[in-house]
Image (cartoon, rainbow, N blue to C red):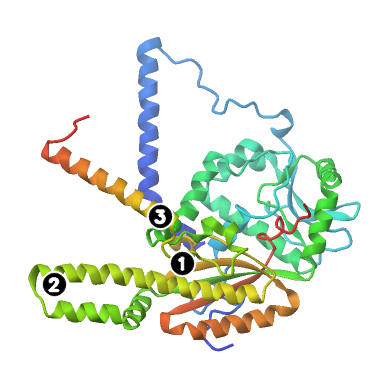
Amino acid sequence: MEAGSSLTPRRNALPGRPAETNLADILERVLDKGIVIAGDIQINLLDIELLTIKLRILIASVDRAREMGIDWWESDSTLRSSSGPPEVAGGDASDRKRLERENRELRERLERIERQIGVGDQS
Amino acid sequence: MSGLEEWARARAPELLARAEEEAVAALRQALIEATVGGRPAAPKPAPSREPRRDQAEGHALWAYAVTRAGQALSGAPAGVDPGAPVERIVHGGLAVLASRVPLAEFGEDPLRENLNRLDWLERVARAHETVLEQALADGPIVPLRLCTIYSNEDGIRTMLDREEEHLTGTLDRLAGRQEWGVKLLLDPDTLARAARERSPEIAGLEEERSGRSGGGAYMIGRKVDRRLAELTHQLATEVAEDVHARLEDCTEDSVLNPPQNRELSGYEGEMLLNGAYLVESSRTEELRDVLTRLEERHSAFGARLELTGPWPPYNFASRLAPA
């Protein structure tokens, strides 16, 4: 293994990084994955409180990725059957989503501007 | 640990704002009650749910994983409650790894609160993971999700009776296979540069722009930016697709997960692939070689591949469960 390669098991993490396993790696697994078997104490990890944490942990990066138009993990199930992953590039659905978001943002900006200059719908 | 702290610090303003909102709401409620009905009645019990009688005190069992009955636990890892070691509860052909936890901390209501304390969540998540990793060294395991808790051993035995066929089948399919994590990180600037260099179209536009000035040059500049963003994205997609396709060739199954939060994970660059791959134990060297070659092949795009594992098969245990 050449020096500086990142292809090392996580126990000998990258140079300059703590040898500790990345917390994001652990949380994405222990909170979201693993077999779900009903215990006697019912804690549904989808409870709203924990969901907020999960969202804050997981979604921050997802939003960033969506801004870039990357949302292929949402169609994971379809990936298995096809030859490759990512139907990332400008699929119809992601185009539409992007346009819808852009549309919404523009409307909001327009409303703000109208309010500032005192014209338009005052409701 | 530091990742989480930094993250929490970054979130502090948002949390303060929320706390302030809640405080204002509580104050408003108190004022209304004081105005309308004099002193408010006795403080409301926070949760409307009645705590179960047997949970007020005592202990429960936190379950980590299911193994075959014959698979001894070579280490003696500490549990999520540091005072209680992990034990094996053997029943029929299976065993559950579990440790005692105090209900004062792990009962339904305290648990709900504790899960939202980041330091608590981190400590427990790491402890859970450590137990699973130690068990994994001894043979196949079915990892259980965080917070699988039973009142006592009888609860665990009942569960094993109910799920035996399912769990045994899953363990059989997991034997001899390992879960590895692969992340593809790209440096956005290097990628954009590569996209620009590879595109005759951009070069043409740049040349056109250099011959103009004012509004014309501006419009072409806008077009260059837009087109470059598209090309960069396209290139990123090609690299991610190539990496995933090669990995699929040498692995049994794969799960693609969303890219991770940058603040929490501490990664630099854009995470374009965050995949879990199920690999035959005999092929892990091949996986490593494939990744090394892929990293070389895409080095011009600032590609970095990170391999982690072997992980407890979190991503595959339920996919491999018999129907």
Three-letter amino acid code at disc 3? Arg
Q: CA distance from mark 3 to mark 1?
A: 14 Å
Q: Position of residue A32 (x, y in %)?
A: 60, 53
How packed mark 1 is, by other alpha carbons closer than 10 Å (few <14, some 14-19, many 20 or more), is: some
What residue type is disc 1 on? Answer: Gly
- The numbered mark, 3 or 1, whose residue comes first in the sequence reads 3
Q: Residue A96 in the image: x percent, y percent?
A: 39, 52
**Residue carrying label 1:** B266
Residue at image location 57% in from the left, 71% down from the top: B182
Give the mark, 1 or 2, whose residue is nearer the N terminus. 2
Q: Residue farthest to the right?
A: B92
- Residue occupying the far bottom of the picture: A2
Q: Is residue B33 left or right of residue B175?
A: left
Using the image, determine if residue B291 lies above or below residue A76. below
Tag 3 and tag 1, C-beta contact below 8 Å: no
| B223 or B316, nearer to the observer | B223
Query: In the image, is residue A77 above or below residue B62?
Result: below
Q: Which residue is mark 3?
A: B9
**Co-location on one chain, circles 1 and 2:** yes
User: How far is the residue under mark 2 from the one under mark 3?
Assistant: 44 Å
Asked if marks 3 and 1 fall on the same chain, the answer is yes
Question: Dot 2 lies on which element?
Answer: helix
